Structure formats: C-alpha cells, structure tokens
Image: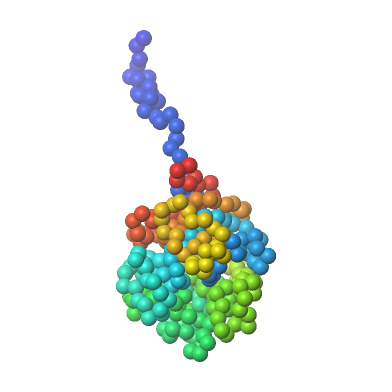
Amino acid sequence: MRLSIKGLFFLLVWVSLPLFPKPSLAAPPSRMADHVFILIMENKGEGEIVHGADAPYFNGLSGGRLTNYWSLAHPSLPNYVGMMGAWPPLPESDDPRIRISGDSLPEEMVSHGHSVGSYMQGLPRPGFGGSRAPRLFGRYVLKHDPFLLFSRLRRGPVRKTVRPLQKLRDDLVQGRVPELSLIVPDLCHDMHGAFACHFHNRHELVKAGDRFLAKWIPVLEGSRLFREGHVWIIVLWDESGFVGHEKRNPDPLPQEKRIHAGGHVPFLWIDSKDSGSWESPCFANHYSLLESLTRNFSLPDLAPPGERIPLPGRGTRCPGE
C-alpha cells in the first residue's frame, strides 16, 4: 500500500502522541490571584480547631481545607519568618531582637513592582519598632510582626507599610489595599493569650479568636475588591503549641520527610472565584505557602531547595499516589 506525503505526515504525528496523559501532581489554580490576604492565628493545633465547638464560625466557612498542613518550628517567631522567606536553620527562640539578614518575600515583591502591607492589631502607629505595645503587658508583640524582623525591611520603605489594623477598612473602601497583606491579631484575639487578656483558658482563647475571624473575614468578603477581583484569603495557624506535650497532641507525625517540627495546624484557602468547599490530604507546610506566593506573583524562588512544592489546589493528586 502506498501512502501519500500528506498521509505519511499524519501517521507520524499520530504515533508520536503519548498513549496516556501524565498525571498532574501540583495543578495550579486556573487563574492566579491579584490580591492575597493572610490571617495568622496562634498556637492551636488541627485537633483543637477543626470540627470543635469553640470555633463555629471558622468551621462553617467555605473554601479549601488542607487537612495535612504542618508548621515549621517551635516557638512562634521562626514560623513567621519562614513564611516570609527565612531559610533553615531557623531561629530557635521568640526573642524580638532577632534580625534576619536574608532575602524576603516583601522585598522581592516590591523590587518587582508589587505592593505589600501588614495590618497589626494593637500597633500604635505605622512602622512602630518596639518589642510590644503598650510597653507594660502589651498585646501587640514584635515577634509576630515578620516584616520588621528582616533587617533590610526594617531599615527600608517597607517598614511604613506595617500599619494598625483599623486602617484596613478605609484601605478597602478607598481601593488602596496592597497586593499582599498580612493580618495579625493581638495576643488576646489570635488564640495565643496574654496576661492582659480577660480570659486565659484555651477554650476561651479559641472562642475569642473565632469572633475575630467572624468580624474581619466578612469585611474582606464584603469588599468591592473581593467581589470584582481575584482574591485569596488564607487563614492559618503559626504552630500547634503542642510541642513538648505529646499526650495532648493526638496527631501522628507525617511520613513526609519535609519540615513539620511545629505541629499539625488548620489551613483554610478562600478563593473569590471559587465559592465551593473542598479538602486536600496532601502534605504541605509554611514553605508551601511561600512557594505558592512566589509563583503567584512571578518572583524568584525563596523557599529552600526540597521545599519548593506549592500548596495543593482543588483536585491536585498527592505525590506518590
């Protein structure tokens, strides 16, 4: 049988096609976000929050829930700076005098033409650099303010983007919200606790944090930015607070070899373009968040080698499946 030149061409194309499509291990969202809000809560593990009676608002929210999400370290401070770009070995204390000299996500964003900001509850004024406020029994603490823990950010113009939380409403109304915003409650509303709080047991702290979320997430979702733009709202915890209390932490350590030293924590991913709910059992940690943010804003790699695996999206197949 003789084939024409045209027939031979199509035959070669057909036999060169793969028989089976390659599975996607890290399928990104169909469209990348133009604004990202990250709400960071404190010192509560997955088992204390998810499906618990003390956090009804958080548990009733729609979005993507990563059920195998882990923090990086203990205590709190290394998790905050890890999310923003600090590499291992991470600091081993909460000392607010610690300064990180390396590259950071806020610095890279600004150098590539993006805007950043941090909204801190209890901050007395923009760019405040003190270790706590008020000075005695302060509920704002620098150790939870990662922008000001990086040396170059603290000395540069990004410092003035660290603003009191009450500025957020006006910024949303006036359309001047940064492309990346951190929202950090004070010690009485982030579930951490402090001497200045009116409550100290873990149940009351979780309830207070849940009320904080119930106040501020509707502000974000009710904004014109959320309705008309593509916005991610990410709610996560810095660490579980269970380190050294294994009997109180029922979560088995993951088999995954990546960093998970701060415990198993809740993670919720709200997408303004996806109103449904979904879950992913794939392992992820704070460096996964950092990797997803650098990809979203087309920035150079900031996560350490071996940790450059983005957050699993809806329908993503876990590695090894």
Instruction: Give the residue at the far top of this rendering.
Output: 1
The vertical placement of 231 against 75, above or below, is above
Q: Say which quadrant the N terminus sits in.
A: top left
Q: Residue at x 34, y 73 (%)?
A: 100
Q: Residue at x 43, y 72 (%)?
A: 77
Instruction: Give the residue at the far left of this rendering.
Output: 101
The vertical placement of 211 against 9, above or below, is below
Q: Where is residue 311 drawn, in percent x and y?
A: 47, 55
Q: Quadrant of residue 58?
A: bottom right
Q: Where is residue 106 drawn, in percent x and y?
A: 39, 69
Looking at the rendered structure, the number of numbered marks drawn on it comes to 0
Q: How is the image coloured?
A: rainbow
- Image-based side of 74 in relation to 169, left or right: left
Q: Residue at x 43, y 37 (%)?
A: 22
Q: Where is residue 38 drawn, in percent x and y?
A: 51, 66
Instruction: Give the residue at the far front of this rendering.
Output: 247
Q: Residue at x 57, y 73 (%)?
A: 191
Question: Does residue 65 appear in this view?
Answer: yes
Q: Where is residue 136 drawn, in percent x and y?
A: 51, 90
36 and 255: which is toward the camera: 255
- Image-based side of 218 in relation to 96, left or right: right
201 and 128: which is toward the camera: 201
Instruction: Give the residue at the far bottom of this rendering.
Output: 136
The vertical placement of 267 against 197, above or below, is above
Question: Does residue 113 appear in this view?
Answer: no
